[in-house]
Amino acid sequence: MKLEEHKLYGWIILLLVLMGSLALWTDVMEPDAALYASIGKNIVLRNDWLNLDVRGADWLDKPHLTFWIVAASFKLFGISAFAYKLPSFLASLLGAYYLYRFAKSLYNQQTALLSVIIFLSALHVVISNFDVRAESYITFFVLASLYHYYRAHRSSWLHLVAGSLFAACAMMVKGIFVTIPILGGCIIYWLLTNQYRQFLKVKWWLALLLILFFISPELYALYQQFDLHPEKVVFGQTGYSGLRFFFWDSQFGRFFNNGPIKGRGDLSFFLHTTLWAFLPWSILLCGAVVSLFKKKGRAGLPPENIMVWSSAAVTFLIFSLSKFQLPHYIIIIFPQFAMMTAVYLNKLAGKGLLTFYRVQGILLVLVMALLIGLAVLFRFEATLGLLLILVLVCLGNFLLFGKASKLTIVASGSATAIGLMVFLYLFFYPAILKYQAGMQAGRWLNEHYPQTDAGVLMYVDAFSFDFYANKEASYFYSFEELDKRHKKEMILYVPAAQLPRLQTDYGAKVLKAFDYYHITKLKGSFLNYRTRAKVLEKFYLVKLP
């Protein structure tokens, strides 16, 4: 690889990191991100690191590690959206670092740099930097574990311990199914290369014992919160075991759809999800997958390359067969997708190179045109400024990188991602979050009534209110419950439907009204500034004497 090209790839990576960091200064969005942030907030306020609590009730859905990381960040930097998002962003960067090390060790430096660029600019990674859940942590831990096990296959026991530690961390974020891309990649590699003796080696059985040892903090926390208290009502029943949920119901129960949390599976779900979530690289990824079925496409690749594609393939298959499917799950194998795509891109030449140069250029123009159309339809603040930026991103790419080459393909894909980051982080998300009423109400409450107790009436998805209000909010699921527990002056966050009764029976005083829209389910009637007012709901902060 030419030194100049090497430097350009480095500058592109730096630019992607800097643009990605803009998401750190944005707010937290409902439902999942606000829920996770409020759980971490409760840990800090109560100084209770064992019991996960949501709305005053024991919460059993995800393991503890994500919330421990969030709570630790809150302890260091204070309770804020920045402190919530920072650890996840750092996990993405560490994932990119391990991706570089893994790809460089397997292939070469050029493939490693391309893999990092593709990973950092993939659409769902861009979205995950803003809508922070648990996937960035899992992606980092899974990739780090796979890398260290790959190294342990060749060298020191320290890599075996590190690989087991990271595998355990992944389990303490999501559950035991996250070991599939790790162990599946290793096992299929052994089988396809006739390394059957690996199954008998003591070190791999020791690795399993190490994983069990490293997940002991999670097992202890679950045992303390649930198994020691059979009287607690969880999922509508008493005597529910947290350990059983961790090892079976949370994973196998969802897979077979016979656990407490159910879904509806679709075999094609992650296929069409990948096509949009891995943009602007999904078409190149399709080419990479097809090439793996050809002898020419596999020529010159190291045998350990099997670990990469088999890890992705077995995980993709298991996800597709599962009855519980969510789009953000697929990001776990984006590093493997990135390496597969980078390897394929490095082999492009002649007509193939020219074809994908045109594809990436057309994709850039289409995405920028779509974003400009959305900007005009929505009418953001400083819309003209946004339009100018998007046009400059598009024109600048073609002026600087005008000839068909690997570098221009990479530049077009990166320009698409940068345009999306500018649009999403600086304009789109801040604009729609104005209609996240819980967040707006929490901030207004902090400014005007910082010491007054706050509550939420009825079943309202108000996790952003929980997080942004200074104090821990109380929840009242009926007026009877409000009558029993309302002992002193309080401010309630309520939907419009409950306001008349509160005013008539309780003498409630309206303090402030807030516009609300379910911003994770966007429709054209909301995006269109002409019809937006018709689809907005009202929520209120009311003061009870």
Image (spheres, helix red, strand yellow):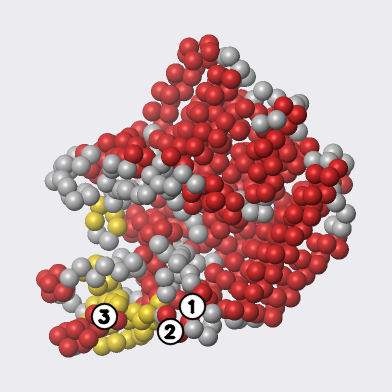
Q: Secondary structure at mark 3?
A: helix
| Dot 3 amino acid type | Ala
Question: Where 186 falls versus 64 (above or below)?
Answer: above
**Residue 513 badge:** none
Q: CA distance from mark 2 to mark 1?
A: 8 Å
- Residue ID for mark 2: 534
* Quadrant assignment for the N terminus: top right
Q: Are marks 3 and 1 in contact (CB under 8 Å)?
A: no
Q: Secondary structure at mark 2?
A: helix
N-terminal of the pair, mark 2 or mark 1, is: 1
Which percent across, then down, holds residue 371? 64, 70
- Tell us which disc is closer to us: 3 or 1: 1
Q: CA distance from mark 2 to mark 3?
A: 17 Å
- Residue ID for mark 3: 497
Q: Secondary structure at mark 1?
A: helix
- Residue ID for mark 1: 525
Q: Is residue 287 left or right of residue 33?
A: right
Nearer the observer, 530 or 311: 530
Q: CA distance from mark 3 to mark 1?
A: 22 Å
* Quadrant assignment for the C terminus: bottom left
Which percent across, then down, holds residue 64? 37, 45
